[in-house]
Amino acid sequence: MFEAIAFYLFAFLTISMFYITVTTSQALYALTALAAGMIFISAFFFILGADFLGAVQIVVYSGAVMALYAFGMMFFDTTREVKEKQGNKAIIFGLGTISAVLIVLIFAAPLVSGNAEALFPMTPGAGNTQEVGMVLFTKYLVPFEVAAVMLLVAMISGIVLAGKKMDLSLTLMNEDEIREMRREENKKVLS
Amino acid sequence: MEIGLNHYLVLSTILFSIGLVGVMRRKNLLMLFFATEILLNSVNISFAAISHYYGDLTGQMFAFFVIAIAASEVAVGLGLLIVWHKKHNSIDLDTMSMMRG
Amino acid sequence: MELFLYTALFAPLVGSLFAALFGASPRTKIAGIVPSILLGVSLISSTVLLVLVLITGHTVHVEMMTWMATGDLYIPFGFIVDQVSVTMMMVVTLVSTVVHVYAIGYMNHDKGFNRFFAWLSAFVFSMMVLVMSDNFAGLFIGWEGVGLCSWGLIGFWYHKESATWAANEAFIMNRIADLGMLIGIFLIYWNTGTLQYDGAFAAMPALTPETLTWIGIFLFIGAMGKSAQFPLHTWLADAMEGPTPVSALIHAATMVTAGVYLVVRSNELYSLIPHVGLFIASLGAFVAIFAASMALVNRDIKRVIAYSTLSQLGYMFVAAGLGAYWVALFHLMAHAFFKALLFLGAGNVMHAMDSELDPFKMGGLGKTMKGTMIMMTLASVALAGIYPLAGFFSKDLILEVAMIEHHYIIYSVLLFTAGLTAFYSFRIVALIFHGEERYKLFGFHPHEAYKFMLVAMSPLLFLAVIAGSFKMTYFEMVTYILPATEYHVHNPAIYWIMTIGTQIFVIISIYYAYKIYMSRDIKVPDGTSKMEKSFAYKLLINQYYIPYFYEECFVKPYRELSTLCWTKIDQKIVDASVDGIAKAFYATGENTRAMQSGNLSTMLKWMVAGTVALLSLAVVFGLAARYSGEIKVILSGLGV
């Protein structure tokens, strides 16, 4: 009973938060709503008994990713409205719904037929974190290391990409300086 | 009232379609990234739910890797976004038409 | 002895390839001389083989290599020199050597000199394959080879519309007939299991008469095409568009007699089915008189000689059809000599008259062209069958055969044709060499041909005169393998009456020809005289309207059908579908180009749409796999 109430509550909250994210025109609202949604999602993980995953969700998303977005937004002129010119809304929502239904169908198919077997059954009596650790560092050791390398690469690339001309800030330069800089860059591109 | 796997899958579907709608209708690149996050998270919910109901940890493992990929995507994507913004002073999707065939 | 066989066979091929090397370069004498010498070598080899066969009676049979060996089918490249083929080899090599040497002079000023010798030697090689092969498949290769070379040589002056037309006509007519021959060969293989002559003929008596009849008919259809028998005769007269040496070699002496050779070679088959033989003989007699009648009025010397060839081929088929195979072969040989001579003489006249062919525009050329006149007159005498020239022995023999076999209708037709033959032969001789010098009106300056051309022709003249004396030797030789029936009228009175009567009839015809066409008031016909307006003349000069009939009944409907197929089927269906596919691609590209606007937002939408499509496929296939059993039940219920 408690589980059901929690599920519906968080389901409602998550959906409304993400709906706001998708529809609002204010970047800041969107960011905040997204962060909230992420945290609500971690609630599902706790309900499902995946405690470690829930913690990771909060730490990585609400901590790292959202912080990244927040810092990223500082570079942009978020006050400026990006014109949201819309095409046919029916197409957009239709496509979204259909694809979602199809994905569920595909995921559900082997479960319904009941021929899915547990590859790494949970160990009774052990805590979730313990189990995760055991599987992650035995069966999934190589993917884990690969993921680590990937994160490292992503980090370096993020620094390299964003770090160029860190000393220049468009917000601090006046119009003429910006234009001058643009012209030089165009020259570079053209040559 | 027992909450079954199907409930989670339906929730995941709803979130996924919201994410897709976001991907399709937002013109702000930053918003696009947000929508992508929603997609990834909706999938994560399914993974966790399946993992729970089948007593199999593989789902959770996948969710971890999805989170790792999401994180690196954000890092690289944001870097690119900053470069683009520096160059064009805009993060509007419609201005990105250099790939015109 | 195999060495001689291979030399005789392959020397012309070497000559042809040698001349072909010079195909693209300007006229060089050597391209004509080397093939001629090689043909001389071939002639000598053939002579050696002839002497061998004549003296020892042995035959040479070699198997060069395996050509096809699949399952039960075994066809080697085998060659045989026996009494029949050695005769043909002699005729072919002798006439072609003479023609080659002659052509060096005749084609002297032609741009295609080198090409001409390449084709001509290739023809000789094909003809040698045809006559020397020991199986039907090899015969067929040679058969097609001579057809191809004939096409190339008739259309030698390909810039002339009429020449290419005639070449195609000859080729197509021959293809029609070759289909018949091919069916005949298939039937032989089907029923006897082999294509070797000896094996096939040995197996034939065991077959049912119906099968044999069909084989005989189909093989004879092939022979009809190659030997231009009615109703496939029209190509031969048109084939005279080719250079005259070609007419002499191919369309008088060798290729057109291939049909006769085929019937003679298949004598064991035809002797089993005498009713087909009778049909062949009747057709031969009909063609003899039919062609001779057209030759009476024609105003083109080469065509007159061509019709005369046709008529003589009719004689040969009469002999072959009545079972007198050696007589047919003997007439074939004698005819080759004097007919080639006539053609080469006509070539000299043409040369002298700047390619003018109308004998009415000549007259009195005998003064300037004595050598040619003597040769052509003697050849005509031989053709007419006056004692003691070749024609007398061979042609009168055919008449005797018809008499002895009690086919009196055929006999009388042939007798009458003999008179016609004499008449038209001497009609052109008289018109060309005697009477008023009408050519002066047209501003021609005739001159005698080169000396060496006349010398080259002299072996033919010699043989045309004396060939008859070989009759008994020849009879003894070929009857090793051909039925040895001596045709002799036993009642001396009838014999002498027949012979002398024929001679007198022929001489009267010659006399009339001279009388009519040597008179001073022969003018170039202009369509006003009473004779030219008569129905018979019109019928004959228009070749019984058969070409028109073919044009109307076959060519035009076929053309219309082709046009119909072209506009309706080819353009509307085949082309349209091919174009349609291309257009569909273009239109798809044109319409989907909008997709590639470069706008990321649009692209994302398309991406989602594509994902949806792929996912639906996955669902459909997943469901199909899941419920395959049920689907099968439903499908089988529907009767699929």
Image (cartoon, rainbow, N blue to C red):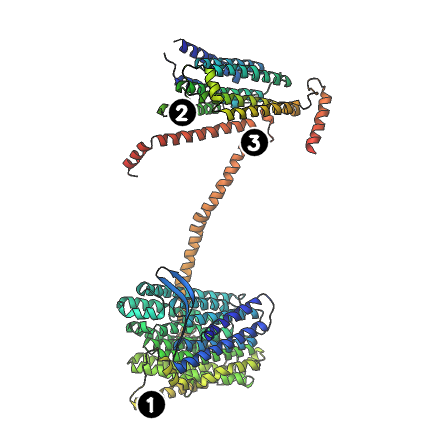
Q: Which mark is residue C113?
A: none
Q: Residue flagged by tag 3: what amino acid is it? A: Ser
Q: Residue B83 in the image: x percent, y percent?
A: 64, 24
Label 2 crowd (10 A; few <14 / some 14-19 / many >=20):
many
Q: Residue flagged by tag 2: what amino acid is it? A: Leu
Label 3 chain ID = C
Label 3 crowd (10 A; few <14 / some 14-19 / many >=20):
some
Label 2 chain ID = A
Counting labels gives 3
Task: Relative to C461, say whether C186 is above or below.
Answer: above
Task: Relative to A12, say whether C160 is above or below.
Answer: below
Q: Which mark is residue A105?
A: 2
Q: Is residue C14 visible?
A: yes
| Quadrant in the picture for the N terminus of chain B | top left
Label 1 chain ID = C
Q: Quadrant of residue C321?
A: bottom left
Q: Quadrant of residue C75?
A: bottom left
How far apart are the two marked residues, 3 and 2, measured between alpha carbons?
33 Å
Whichever of callouts 3 and 1 sits on the residue coming sooner in the sequence is: 1
How far apart are the two marked residues, 1 and 2, measured between alpha carbons?
112 Å
Q: Which mark is residue C496?
A: 1
How far apart are the two marked residues, 3 and 1, measured between alpha carbons?
106 Å
Q: Which mark is residue C597?
A: 3
